[in-house]
Image: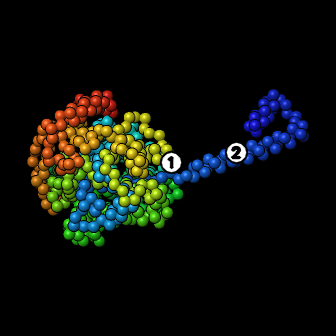
Amino acid sequence: MAKRACLRYAIDKRSGCNEISAGVLAVYRLLQVLCFGLMFASGAVVRANNDQPLPNFIVIFCDDLGYADIGPFGAEGYQTPNLDRMAKEGMKFTDFYVGRSFCTPSRAALLTGCIPTRVGIGGNFGPRSTTGLNPDEMTIAEVLKQKNYATAIFGKWHLGHLPKFLPTNQGFDEFFGLPYSNDMWPFHPEQQRVHFPDLPLYEGDKIINPKVTPEIQKTLTRRLTERAVEFIDKNKEKPFFLYLPHPQPHVPLFASEKFLKKTKRGLFGDVLTEIDWSVGEILGALKRNKIDERTCVVFTSDNGPWLLYGNHAGSAKPLREGKGTNFEGGFRVPCLMRWPGRIPAGTVCREVCSTIDLLPTFARLAGAPLPKNKIDGKDIAPLMFQHPGAKSPHPVFYHYDGRNRLVALRSGKWKLMFPQSYGSPIPGKDGRPGKRVSKTIPLSLFDLEKDIGETTNVAEKYPEVVQRLMAAADAMRKDLGDGPKAGPGRRPIGR
Ligand code: MG
């Protein structure tokens, strides 16, 4: 009514009725006051809604950390008390998958919510790559930017090191760390063969040190952690997305002086002890800033252990093989999530979920629109919050390899692997790689419930399961294609 009166006055003005009687003026003033009152009241409601703080998201993404490399998943020879606490206060995911069993594509999957093949990414990028994650793809950081999140990445990027592909052009306000893997440098044990240039260290889009030395690598876990804590302190009043992709425990292994020679497991155990310390610092910063209950922390890995490096690699026990293969040891990683008051404490989720689910889940929780392009990830909040009857949103989960071939499918307890060759390692020692022996498997079906180690092929015993999964594979091929034969759903890599 007040609105109508105001409008009426405006119409009167437009029609030249400038003379207003004292009575009319008094009524108008009264209405004006009412108008203001209503505006103020509705404004207060808007503020109240906006005052519901949006959740913060922290993703701690280790490099080449195996399924059994942290306490809650059975680590041996060293302790991870902070990760143990994180599991006790949160949820452990036993069937959590990455988008591919090595670095670059796994990171693309995490940040875009897509099977890496969908965003055109096959193998790893190196120092001489001219490609990168296509800036047209939306990353988690860009999705959350729609809701004014502060965003930062401290650690290893590995999605293209040319300026247009750097994190600061992919939704991140801050970047401190390495452009690609920490072994792509002149100290590589096979440098004679691979000829890596110097490894640079970045701050934003600038190289702040063109030549990372072993002494600098030793400091990285500590410095990345300090930057993460600083970022949390600075942004405690506003929603933030903090991405902490540790370059460790990818070889070459490095830990700060004060963590060296502290565990029975040697340098690998020392590195893990420092990563665990880092988790403790981050959880401590959340508590100190009293933002524990509006912060979701995810701890996971980009792929399984690099078994070729023997005692400098982690363990995927009881899973088969490790990094670079399509067995569970390559794709299945340890995962913990903690969010006091939202994720029930001390719980376990055995449903299939994946790093590709983080983007749509965070988007939903932040009320941010999803990317316009198709993504493969699904909202797993119902699993995180233990809604009654919540199930995996992936009736079938698809594994594509570095050559964009559809190599395996997981559906419930079943895993179908197409005939393929793989490199089975003869482990090396003390930072030197061993050798790979090429092996092959025929079309194989594994019952992961009874046979988590993928030891017994039951394809002949369950032909109807094989047939159903073959049909699911065909449906996916119509979308993403298979190998060099690209489907219509495959989008271009950044060039
Ligand atoms: Mg990796």
Drawn side of residue 204 relative to residue 70, left or right = right
The quadrant of the rendering that contains the N terminus is: top right
Would residue 242 be found to the left or right of residue 311 on screen?
A: right
Residues tagged 1 and 2 counted as in contact (Cβ below 8 A): no
Indicate the secondary structure of the residue bearing disc 1.
Answer: loop
Question: Is residue 242 left or right of 447 when viewed as pictured?
Answer: right
Write down the residue under mark 1. Answer: 148
Q: Nearer the viewer, residue 276 or 337?
A: 337
Amino acid identity at mark 2: Met
Task: Out of 354 and 372, give the one closest to the viewer.
Answer: 354
Identify the residue at horizontal 17%, vertical 34% (top origin): 463
| Disc 1: CA contacts within 10 A as few (<14), some (14-19) or many (>=20) | some
| Residue 492 x %, y % | 32, 34
- Disc 1 vs disc 2: which is toward the camera? 2
Residue 360 appears in the figure: yes
Residue position for label 2: 39
Crowding at dot 2, Cα within 10 Å, few <14 / some 14-19 / many 20+, comes out as few
User: Looking at the image, which residue is at 35% across and 38% down?
Assistant: 376
Question: Residue 484, relative to residue 234: is it above or below?
Answer: above
Q: Quadrant of the C terminus?
A: top left
- Circle 2 SS class: helix
Which amino acid type is shown beneath numbered disc 1? Asn
The mark nearer the N terminus, 1 or 2, is 2
Q: CA distance from mark 1 to mark 2?
A: 25 Å
Q: What residue is shown at x 34% (from left), y 43% (from top)? A: 392
Disc 2 C-beta below 8 A from ligand 1 = no
Q: Position of residue 349 (x, y in %)?
A: 34, 51
